[in-house]
Amino acid sequence: MFNFKKFLFLVFLLMHICTLPLIAQKRIYTTQRITSNPPIIDGVLNDPVWELVEWSGNFTQHRPYDGQPPSQETKFKILYDDKNLYIAYRAYDTEPDKIAEITSPHDWFPGDWIEINIDSYFDKRTAFSFTLSVSGVKGDEFVSNDGDNWDTSWNPIWYGKTNIDEEGWTAELQIPLNQLRYGNKDEQIWGIEITRRIFRKEERSCWQYFPQDTSGWVSNFGELHGIKGIKQQRHIELLPYIVGKAQRFEKEQGNPFADGSSEDLNLGLDGKIGVTSDMILDFTINPDFGQVEADPSEVNLTEFETYFREKRPFFIEGSNIFNFQLTYAIAGGGRDNLFYSRRIGHKPGHYPDNYDYIDMPDNTTILGAFKLSGKTKKGLSIGIMESLTDKEKAEIELNNKIQKITVEPLTNYFVSRIIKDFNKGNSYLGGMFTATNRKIDDVALKYMHKAAYTGGIDFFHQWKDKTFHLKTTAAVSKVLGDKEAILETQTSSARYYQRPDNNYVSVDSSRTSLTGHAGTILVGKVSRGRFRFETGISWRSPGFELNDVGYLRKADQINQLTWVGYWINEPFSIFRRFDVNANQWCNWDFGGVNTSNSVNMNLNATFLNNSNFGGGVTRKFEYISNNILRGGPSAKRPGYWDGNFHFNSDTRKRLSFGCGSGAGLGDNDNNYWKYYWVNLNFRPNNQLRISINPSYNICEQKLEYVSTEEYEGEDRYIFAKMHQKTSSITFRLDYCITPNFSIRYYGSPFISAGKYSNFKKISDYPLADKYKDRFVFFEDDEIVYNHDNEEYEIDENADGEVDYYVDNPDFNFKQFNSNLVIKWEFRPGSTLYLVWSQGRTDCISIGDFSFKGDIKDLFNVHPHNVFLIKVNHWFSL
């Protein structure tokens, strides 16, 4: 007799089984120790020692057709001895004449390549990645957070050669064991993954297969067995350098510090010491970063500090361990972080205000720094950084007398970080502590903090086969200093305690310390299936402060955010990949005021021919700004619409391009903006790449802040209509004659002009419901421009007497930065640099924009040229 209940049970059971994720069988490769001569690393694979082990292959396509057989077969072998790991690749190709042999700088991963990731800690969260392109270009990365972070700044010393033959191409690698980190065990088990890229098909295939939507990367690796009896390797690397620098600039009559030239010779030392097999000490003494590219030009009209990306090698390498981002959300959450390495060696903070001529240091001198980092066999990651910067002095001439004035005190920076993995790599608990201590002996520097401390803890947990996750962070801060320093902190743009309508915190001019707290709670699903989401809250209390060794844009805020996305990673119809997502944000201050609400939607797609496009629309509703009046009361601001799109052709082609545009329109006709950009790339051969990236922006803001003035004991917040045009062109040339010899050029002219008109003052009702009630225009008889003094004279009561003055805010800023670097790695780790840098800068109080005329004027400015030759030599002891 038919049993309907049993039938339903079997149906549901079958449905459950069918919807379970497919778990790929864990693959194992067993290696052998070399007891005879090791292979010669020439890429030919004709050494008899390779016969000790069998080939392993049967790769599976990872993209574009997930889970399908690859278009070409790949095999590999692995051997080892007491000092090195050896890897042989056979990359079959039925059309060897189509193999893409493209030369590029280190870590560009050009053309066809094969990559091995090695989880030598076997913690299933971190790995060391070694990529070898068929052209011989090497790439190396440190992988952390189970594949979420790939750090290209890690630069180990290893060897690799390739060879193209009638069957495809082959490669041999030699990886010194002292470049890896591993536990002290009699027998090692390491995680490994090997990936091959076929450039012409943009195809990736892997040895250990797992579906694209599987959470994590390192935790899914296959295993390498058979490594026995390897001892801890002595790891001492020294990289001394010598650098000669000559500068040529405009000679100024009467200026004792601008005679037109200067020369300098400098010495320094970088190094690495393997404290244990899993802990490395990096150090630098008197570092030099003369070969580093200049920051992009900008005109910042906001009240907030610009965030600049770190480019200095010592601070980039291994930086992931020191990352403690307060809102690390898919939906975005700013750059607030307990550690911002650009604080170390920054531009001096004090600028003297009484001099005839001045010679101001460009940056604070870093006397020395060290980093201790690694991961113990029990899964504890450790990072410690210590840095000392010198007391800096500016030379000034006043009344024909030269004197030195301290502009930055002797400062010590300390940063520490620990992370403990547990629950089979599904969870971690971390902590961070930072300290900044300054030796302040000069009265002019009393506005700086004597000491600043921050501490934080973070927790991450995944469940249901890493489908869902929970992220939490909590942090506290404390700054100490003289009353002047803490008053400066309370009234800074990050918090504005002095706002007259601020009823939950107030300025206390007697304070000598300030404390605060911050945190984040996020929950989400970012794997297993097409639907993904993340939602959560974050906060920063009014007293929270990070800007001594961290980065904080704005305190006094509570944020709620939600991100929802839909992903299709398999090719369908005309698409290779497709995703769409929506975002929502709400913000409050600590007084409980809902300051802003926004929604957003984005779409991104990659076509079958590898071109891609994307776009987005954002709606920000009418909002309240606590900072637009720069310490004045809160003000209501009109909402706006913003839209953008971009398109990029297939970048693998010799000629490729991208373009994009965006536009925004404010409510009440308050503001509008438009911008356009184009990116052209040309690769005439496999060694040369040329790119040019022009951009053009137009914006008009009818309520742009100008200044705060005092009138009859009250503050006047002066605003105006500002029309700004900005244009820039970035030109790059990369000529890689060989993987070890390159010529690279960067040049970028930048022009921005802003013209102000329709001056107005904020009314007594900045929170008025009606837009026009929030400000009052100056009448013609109330404001007059004085051309001789370049200032506006304001007569509010129209009695014929000037009540106060406003400097002319019009500007025309022009800048050109260029950098030519010839780099020759004459032996592994040892490099010769020849560098020519040029800068031209000019700024005048005229708001007119003329690209042709401004470019002509820019290149009539006398340049500041820097010529540099730097040689370093790598020693391994």
Image (cartoon, rainbow, N blue to C red):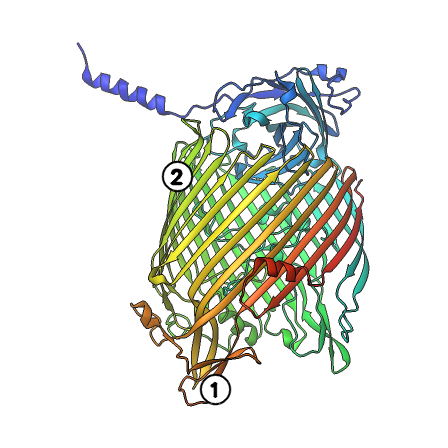
Amino acid of disc 1: Val
Quick one: 88 or 784, which is closer to the camera?
784
Q: Residue visible at 19% across and 17% down?
A: 4
Q: Residue visible at 44% across and 27% down?
A: 571
Instruction: Work out which residue is located at the far left of the displayed protein and give it.
Output: 1
Cα separation, mark 2 vs mark 1, equals 58 Å
Above or below 671: residue 25:
above
Amino acid of disc 2: Val
Q: Which residue is mark 1?
A: 802
Q: Residues within 10 Å of mark 1 (few under 14, many from 20)?
A: some
Instruction: Quadrant for the C terminus, please.
Output: top right
Q: Which mark is residue 89?
A: none
Instruction: Work out which residue is located at the far top of the displayed protein and give it.
Output: 1
Q: Where does the image place residue 502, in percent across and percent down from the top left?
A: 39, 71
> In this view of the protein, can residue 874 be seen by the observer?
yes
Above or below 231: residue 766:
below
At numbered mark 1, what does the secondary structure look like: helix, strand or loop?
Answer: loop
Q: Where does the image place residue 472, in percent across and percent down from the top left?
A: 44, 48
Q: Which residue is mark 2?
A: 580
Quick one: 133 or 200, which is closer to the camera?
200
